[in-house]
Amino acid sequence: MFERKIKFLAPSILMDDKKLHPEPTNKFLPEWFKELPLSYSSIGKKNHLHKTIKSCMPFLDAIKTGYVIKASTDIYFNHNFDNPDINNEKDTHIITKTQDYQLVLASKRLNINTGGEGHDPEQLGGNKCPFVHDNKGKRFFKILNPWVVKTPPGYSTLFIQHFNNPDKRFTPIAGIVDTDVFNLPVNFPIIMHQEGEWLIKKYEPVICVFPFKRDDWKHEIKSLSMEEIDKENFTYFTHFHSYYKNLIWKVKKWI
């Protein structure tokens, strides 16, 4: 039986730091979502309960999908949106913190941030690009990633912000890599939203890793008959409670 397994490979020096190892996204659900009840009552109607988004299987599937890669070191930002010089030290100053001098010396080999790396706005087309506009015209900082992601033959990987769990400080720019044949770490350019001083702490989630099978697709447009619509509506309205979960939804495992 074919086993779908994604591998995360890194230099042996990182193996002992198990907190740094990539993990399934379901271990990083936001607190607001974990505290959300399954239902709520309408204002003035205590006996009239409505389901919350916590009962929505499509939302739940998305927020639990894939794996998380974490920051391999503390990254400190002092970001000034109003400074017109995109490369001025007062604009974006990145300081990484590590207590291991040998680790600093080996940073290039380990592919971790010990200084600023990024992309000029012109690489994305300048002000014509909405990403440049969102990043206030500044240089795009790039989070370096020590992990080589490997998937089985025919499988690629989408690197994207954790689904349904945005970070108000920054947004990674999404990318797809054919990780069945690519043998280097994938780094993550980010759009910075937060001004002033802020920190991405070591072990914080920075990217969602979603492996998928490559396929060629065609699209088709056709009408539904009233008979097809009525049949599906009948099934829905006669199984209103947990219709999608009980009749449509398939269990997905990320371990």
Image (spheres, rainbow, N blue to C red):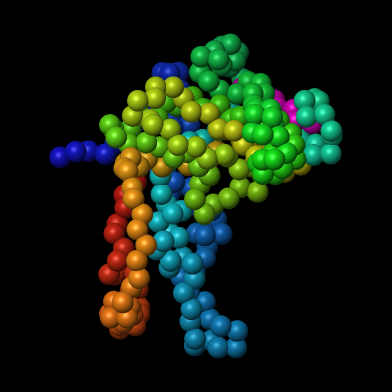
Q: Which percent across, then down, holds residue 47?
A: 49, 88
- In front: 218, or 108? 218
Q: Quadrant of residue 131?
A: top right
- Residue 30 in the figure: left or right of residue 1: right
- In front: 35, or 58? 58
Residue under the image location 56 percent in, 16 percent down: 107
127 in relation to 65, above or below: above
Question: Number of marks in the image?
Answer: 0
Q: Which percent across, then down, holds residue 191?
A: 65, 39
Residue under the image location 54 percent in, 52 percent down: 165
- In front: 160, or 6? 160
Residue under the image location 27 percent in, 69 percent down: 247
User: In the rendered view of the protein, which quadrant contains the N terminus?
Assistant: top left
For the magenta stretch, what is the residue range? Answer: 91-98
- Residue 225 in the figure: left or right of residue 197: left
6 in relation to 116, above or below: below
Q: Quadrant of residue 7?
A: top left
Q: Which percent across, then down, holds residue 93?
A: 74, 27
User: In the rendered view of the protein, which quadrant contains the C terminus?
Assistant: top left
Q: Which percent across, then down, holds residue 187?
A: 53, 28
Whether residue 196 appears in this view of the structure is: no
Is residue 234 covered in magenta? no
Whether residue 149 appears in this view of the structure is: yes
Magenta segment main secondary structure = loop
The residue lying furthest to the right in this view is 83
111 in relation to 208, above or below: above
Residue under the image location 35 percent in, 58 percent down: 220
Q: Quadrant of residue 5?
A: top left
